Image (spheres, rainbow, N blue to C red):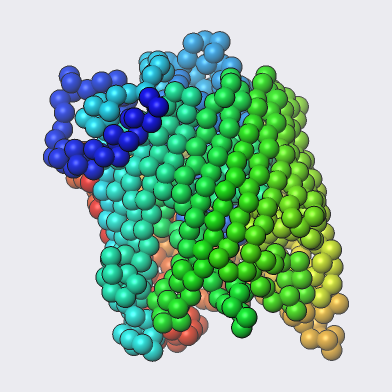
Amino acid sequence: MKYWQPIIRLLLKLFFIGSSQLFYVPSVCAQDSSSRSEEDREKHVSLRPWQEYLMELSEMEDFEQTAWEDYEEELEELAQHPLNLNTATREEMEHLPFLTPSQVEDIQAYLYRYHGMKTMAELALIPSISWYQRQLMNSFFYVADETPRQQFPSLKNILKYGKHEVMGMVKVPFYERKGDGKGADGYLGYKYRHGVRYQFRYGDYVKMGFVGAQDAGEPFGSGRNNLGYDFYSFYLQVRKLGRWKNITLGRYRLHEGMGLILNKDFSFGKLSVLSSLGRTTSQIKVHSSRSSANYLQGAAATYTLLKGLDLTGFLSYRKIDATLSDEGGIKTILKTGLHRTRREIARQDIASNTLVGGNINYRHQGWHIGATGFYTSFSLPLMPEKVQLYKRFAPEGDAFWNVSVDYGYISHRWTIGGETATGDCGAVATLNAASYQFSDHFSLTAVQRFYSARYYSLFSNSFAEGSSVQDENGMYVGATWSPGSRWTITAYSDFAYFAWPKYHTRQSTQSWDHLLNILYLPARSWTLGARVRYKEKAGNATGRLRFYASVTMKNWSSKTSVDYTKYREGNAGSGTGNASSSGTQNASSSGYLLNENLGYHWRWLRLQGSFGYFHTQDFASRIYAYEPGLLYQMSFGSYFGEGIRYALMARSEISRHLLVIAKLGSTDYFDRTHISSGLQEIAGSHQMDLEVQVKWKW
């Protein structure tokens, strides 16, 4: 009972007492070690954009299958509140996708042997950590002489020294969509997108907050949104409370095992598989992003039964959007979160979902084994349109269950991990990965997966070529090689076979995916890179080339990149169903993008600008490009046709409490007289937006 008292008291007092401290700043001499630690963390945030580093580890062509907003929000949160490397746990280090489990073990061994680090420069003494990775770690870690706290802090210190943060954003479009201002015949709300976010946190122990978000076209403060915003997220998380490792209430995300039955968290592209796979840590994270689909709602907690033995339980109940069949069942679960028109609002919260389950895992001397199980039900039965071949084995009914076993071993050389799952479907899915570190400069990774066509789990999200953990049999082999201190070469080859027809196919298909990435660092301020990828799926082939060069000086930075893509469409015999049956020649298209990013930093002001010219023949040869964006937002653009894209962002830290960010971006097309279609259609070839974000912390 003693563990629950601080939580109950915190819930009752935090909003009332915390709000009275809005303009209260405690003196330095009165702060305890936790408060000083938080100040040190903010000072050690790297000035160089960490997003640029991560983009080189992630494959942008996986953009459409990745929850990039959740991905950005999680990593931005870590960058805003970096960890003391001397006290960070293995689980906290494994949150970062660019560190392999073996490298985490090497760091932990070094900290134990030498009783911590004095500076981040000591990472150079760990041979398996490359210079490239050390730069990334500077964005998420700092080093301080700080001993781990032995007991949970008092409620008085939490309220007195906790950090508050309020952030608001608005996006103003300088154009009209076809559906704007049409009332019942179009969008029911105005064209502005805006949101608000509040968060309170005390070190690594307490985090509480809420998010309110409104998409363009959604009604604000009227109809079903009579409380203002269309989307709200509330959460409270308490960590390291005695044996309670994590207690989370409200909206949260879960990652259990390797995601074969339950993963509401984000996943990464194939290139980062070389470091991220093999982890089977049970993770509970608060849902503090604008995403209205990928979360659970209720409670989740992890309790340490014995040393190395953890038990996690979770319960969720939430409303869901859906389209209904003629019989009144759920035909499709909707995840867009858009409620702009009468039709979209009619599908809002039309059904509900309940989930209850748990996980138990044990770790000892590098070995780990765990088991996860859950039961879920819907207020209306799932009734997919099974007349379509690719939906033949879609889940049907109103109640389902899944169980899985995950396992693995981690040492200095070996990283082995896997998960095998089943459920009421009566079929099996298994994923197994092994990585061996031949030396500090070369490692090899292999991933095998078999997902039966009859297998399904409604909450799975794991390594797959397809869009779901179903009907896939494949093998992935990748390698990382550092022939010298300035070189890093990564490559992979992935084969997948789909026994049952996929969307737009009528027979079995397969895919081959190959990638080679070369990174060269001629000097500390220079980075040169090249990437080539060739992918053939269901007879369609896509080749992509990318070259880039970046330089970072004291106050300014520059990055120049060139992207080229070539697409070839297969014929009807390949099973694509897109080419005519008359045997016409295969269609092909190509395109390129020239892009420049510039950055300048002077005292309290940072300026970043980007300019790109794109020219592609059609949508199939589209190119993705990253550009600087606001906090907690991933700025990726998809470009096809001919035009230019340019953006300017200014970030001003007016004081230690106030941060203002403004971004003006525009896309001008040369090959069309209108943009998009339907209610989203813009009567013109020019699209410009202004985004403003204000963050106040105290």
Side of 114 relative to 619 (left or right): left
Task: Name the spot of residue 95 as percent of width and height, x first.
Answer: 53, 37
Where 162 falls versus 578 (above or below)? above
The image quadrant that residue 502 belongs to is bottom right
Determine the residue positioned at 52% across, 47% down: 315
- Report the residue that reaches farthest toward the top: 114
Please name whichever residue, 409 or 174, is drawn nearer the observer in this view of the structure.
409
Determine the residue positioned at 73% across, 71% down: 391
Where 440 falls versus 686 (above or below)? above
Please name whichever residue, 433 or 205, is drawn nearer the observer in this view of the structure.
205
Q: Is residue 139 visible?
A: no
Please name whichever residue, 213 or 624, is drawn nearer the observer in this view of the structure.
213
Please name whichever residue, 284 or 104, is drawn nearer the observer in this view of the structure.
284
Where 204 falls versus 297 (above or below)? above
- Report the residue that reaches farthest toward the front: 1
Q: Name the quarter where the C terminus is drawn.
A: top left
Q: Is residue 5 visible?
A: yes
Determine the residue positioned at 56% across, 52% down: 355
Task: Name the spot of residue 542 as percent of width and height, x first.
Answer: 71, 65
Determine the residue positioned at 34% across, 72% down: 224
The image quadrant that residue 413 belongs to is top right
Task: Name the spot of residue 439 as percent of width and height, x first.
Answer: 72, 25
